């Protein structure tokens, strides 16, 4: 059997201020290649915190987060950055596209960071945009795209490197129900086609129900509600 794409072992996270606020209290789970996982829970339950830990964007108070069998804690900051770029894709509620760059340039950014040839980067980005139904919008700026188109563009950017896993934090939260449904279908369909695992944080039970596995975060712990 292949190894997990991502793994958490005894993860605790406490935020310290005037008082200590425990958020995650012993998280253990794994994400396998091609798996589609939804993480649900009340607002403020720690879903986004957990996603940041999975992506190596934050460090746990204790415990280990591993990507493809390697612990983030054993990596330098530079190495974590390289691993994120090579292994993970990220999609957020707000698209975070760069306003002064075209759709195809935005999608090609992770490839530019890898120092891939510009022509090859743009060709690859254009191909992925076509896969998400935006082949006719390559040269449009983000401000010229609809909300659903901007999120499709953000998803194309997340998968252009062929990541092992995409981490999505309320990726359809700013969209109306119909547009959210369309964008989510594109995300899941393409992730399945290319064999990428997909972890989505969502408060939308309808979207969560279309994942292969649902984990609910409650009082700092995960419980599996469907597998």
Image (spheres, rainbow, N blue to C red):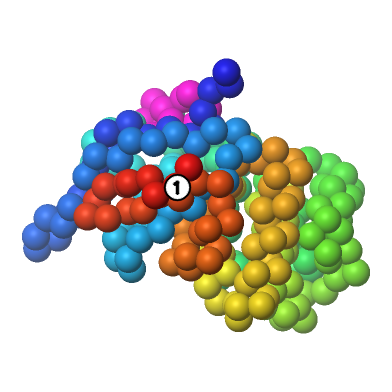
The residue most toward the front is 226
> Would you say 23 lies left or right of 91 here?
left
* Residue at position x 58%, y 40% in the image: 35
Residue 3 locus on image (x, y percent): 53, 23
The residue most toward the left is 19
Residue 209 locus on image (x, y percent): 53, 58
Residue 175 locus on image (x, y percent): 60, 77
Instruction: Assess disc 1: are there few (<14), some (14-19) or many (≥20) residues with their C-alpha within 10 Å of its C-alpha.
Output: few
| Magenta span contains residue 70 | yes
Picture quadrant of residue 164 = top right
> Would you say 164 lies left or right of 21 here?
right
* Residue at position x 63%, y 38% in the image: 34
Residue 195 locus on image (x, y percent): 70, 38
Quadrant occupied by the N terminus:
top right
- Residue 55 seen by the camera: no
Nearest the eye: 77 or 27:
27
Nearest the eye: 112 or 97:
97
Magenta segment: 65-74
Element at label 1:
strand
- Residue 63 seen by the camera: yes
Position above or below: 223 against 29: below
* Residue at position x 66%, y 41% in the image: 196
The residue most toward the top is 1
* Residue at position x 43%, y 43% in the image: 54
């Amino acid at each position: 059997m292949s190894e997990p794409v991502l793994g958490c072992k005894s993860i605790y996270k406490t935020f310290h201020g005037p008082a200590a606020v425990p958020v995650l209290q012993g998280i253990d789970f794994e994400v396998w290649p091609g798996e589609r996982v939804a993480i649900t829970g009340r607002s403020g339950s720690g879903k986004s915190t957990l996603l940041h830990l999975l992506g190596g964007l934050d460090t746990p108070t204790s415990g280990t987060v591993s990507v493809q069998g390697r612990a983030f804690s054993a990596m330098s900051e530079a190495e974590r950055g390289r691993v994120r770029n090579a292994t993970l894709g990220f999609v957020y509620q707000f698209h975070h596209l760069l306003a002064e760059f075209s759709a195809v340039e935005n999608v090609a950014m992770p490839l530019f960071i890898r120092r891939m040839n510009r022509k090859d980067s743009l060709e690859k980005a254009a191909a992925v945009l076509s896969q998400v139904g935006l082949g006719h919008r390559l040269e449009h700026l983000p401000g010229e795209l609809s909300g659903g188109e901007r999120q499709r563009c953000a998803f194309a950017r997340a998968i252009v490197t062929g990541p092992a896993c995409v981490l999505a934090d309320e990726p359809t939260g700013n969209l109306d129900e119909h547009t959210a449904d369309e964008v989510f279908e594109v995300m899941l369909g393409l992730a399945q086609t290319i064999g990428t695992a997909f972890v989505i944080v969502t408060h939308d039970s309808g979207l969560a129900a279309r994942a292969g596995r649902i984990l609910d975060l409650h009082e700092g712990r995960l419980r599996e509600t469907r597998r």
